[in-house]
Amino acid sequence: MQIIESINEMQAHSVSLRHQGKLISFVPTMGFLHEGHLSLFEVAKEESDVTVASIFVNPAQFGPNEDFDQYPRSVEKDLELCRQRGVDIVFLPKKEELYPTGYSTYVCEESLSQPLCGVSRPSFFKGVCTVVAKLFNIVRPDVAVFGQKDAQQAAVIRKMVQDLHFPVEIRVAPIVREADGLAMSSRNSYLNEFQRRDAVRIYQALCKGKELYDNGNRNVDRILAEIIHHISECRRLRVIYVSAVDKDTMKPITRTMVEGQTLIACAVWCDEVRLIDNLIL
């Protein structure tokens, strides 16, 4: 496995691989890897000749009062997991090179990024689009793989790729869950034993909504109310949003839910820890 830190070296290596006719797949991460990330590597390996992963905690997607400094980091462990899972190249850029002094150029998607997480985290998707656009220009991938847990992020990136004509195919891999259903996330490491136990209720609530849908109930308000009620019964959990949207456009669904197209997405505070999850009906 090759570790590259320099932007110029990564670009040159990618250009060389492409000249050799190699297909490149790419998984951008913020590190502190878990089975969810590792499942993305498996998808990426099936799509290409060379698999590249990046590890970079992106300061541009954190708000002023968010957890950039506390965000979990474990670079050596991450590198070993990458080796074990057959990643060919790990790109480890430095913040000072990606965002040098005087940096002032950002990429904004202004439609899909507005609802859901965009309401409470107004600068988040600007930071995501900016760093992903930069990484695409550096790594030059043919395919990039994202996770379904971050469904809105994946949709926003796909729209950015379409609008800005990036020659990159976007793949979205299923959510990987713990045995009790909690969606895997680096931020799960913030949870203590009691918070961890209560956080499972988020997925259980989504399943309650799906159960209503599977039993023939197509009333959006009824399904969302059931999910909110189930979450709110736990004193540690506070709903930020629970919404039904089109999984591609992120537009709200208020009446007819199309099977396979309706995304039920939620964000919830578990005490001071912000967690997200979703299901497609």
Image (cartoon, helix red, strand yellow):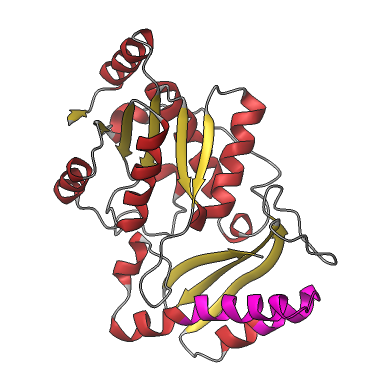
Task: Report if residue 43 lies within the magenta region.
Answer: no
Task: Report if residue 217 lies within the magenta region.
Answer: yes
User: Going by the image, does 116 lie left or right of 94?
Assistant: right
Q: Is residue 115 above or below residue 267?
A: above
Which residue is painted at 43% across and 67% down in the image?
Answer: 183
Q: Residue furthest right?
A: 255
- Residue 138 x, y percent position in the rendering: 39, 22
- Residue 207 x, y percent position in the rendering: 58, 77
Which residue is painted at 44% across and 51% down in the image?
Answer: 62
Q: Which one is in front, 207 or 250?
A: 207
Rendered image quadrant of residue 236: bottom left
Q: Is residue 168 visible?
A: yes
Q: Which one is in front, 210 or 76?
A: 210
- Picture quarter with the C terminus: bottom right
Magenta stretch: dominant secondary structure: helix
| Number of numbered discs | 0
Q: Is residue 3 above or below residue 112?
A: above
- Picture quarter with the N terminus: top left
Q: Is residue 29 visible?
A: no
Q: Residue furthest top?
A: 19
Q: Which one is in front, 240 or 154?
A: 154
- Residue 41 x, y percent position in the rendering: 34, 43
Q: Which one is in front, 80 or 76?
A: 80
Q: Which residues are magenta?
A: 201-226
